Image: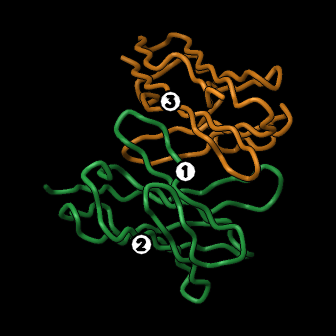
Chain colours: A orange, B green
Amino acid sequence: DAGVIQSPRHEVTEMGQEVTLRCKPISGHNSLFWYRQTMMRGLELLIYFNNNVPIDDSGMPEDRFSAKMPNASFSTLKIQPSEPRDSAVYFCASQGNGIQYFGAGTRLSVL
Amino acid sequence: AQSVTQPDIHITVSEGASLELRCNYSYGATPYLFWYVQSPGQGLQLLLKYFSGDTLVQGIKGFEAEFKRSQSSFNLRKPSVHWSDAAEYFCAVGSSGSARQLTFGSGTQLTVLP
């Protein structure tokens, strides 16, 4: 298995633009998690899905953030409009047998 | 609410020396405990986990950790550190349930001197 695949690896955009981050979980995994990592706040859980259904989105910072999981093999995290304070590394993880496996992350820079 | 404390922000050791990274957790029930490692520009890789049973668990790359319920600790150890072990290490506690939410500590940055 190729592991959790995230795209793009790097994204540079201007303030106000829409940003979409993508994640392909490991096949057979039923849960998917989105995290944000910054120097100031460390690793924060944004939202997670179980069987494609959003379970807890209390970590989503504000309404500018949204996440979807239309099927078991794909999820997106969207920021609209983006702001400089959204600059961070965003990780996706999928869970199998109680263990979370992380993607390589998307480094987002909002100018 | 669950929480994890990694009291050491940065640790420096010489290559070949032993290593212990500290982790203390707070959780109301039997904890599910993890150690992950993150190299620069990479995602998190699982080193080892504790779910139940033997309190001394072995992981990849020669790492081990010991669960001590009385001290609410899950310290990571390695008898002889290699230069390639330089990275950031995260301890995490997981909730019960089918989708196991993880709460991470703030991480310990390990520097290895030649």
Q: Nearer the viewer, mark 2 or mark 1?
A: 1
Residue A43: image location, x then y, percent: 50, 47
The C terminus of chain B: image quadrant: bottom left
As measured in the structure, the alpha-carbon distance from the residue carrying label 2 to the one carrying label 1 is 17 Å
Q: Which amino acid, mark 1?
A: Leu
Distance from Cα at disc 2 to Cα at disc 3: 26 Å
Q: Is residue B31 above or below residue A101?
A: below
Where is residue A92, by image quadrant?
A: top right
Residue at image coords 50%, 30%: A105
Q: Is residue B47 left or right of residue A59?
A: left
Front of the two marks 3 and 1: 1
Q: Residue at x 46, y 32 (%)?
A: A89
The answer to whether residue B1 is seen in the rendering is no
Where does the image place residue A51, in percent across and percent down from the top left? 86, 35
The residue tagged 1 is B46
Horizontal side of A35 relative to B30 (left or right) equals left
Q: Secondary structure at mark 3?
A: loop
Density class for disc 3 (Cα within 10 Å; few <14, some 14-19, many ≥20) is many
Q: Residue beneath label 2, please?
A: B22
Q: How many marks?
A: 3
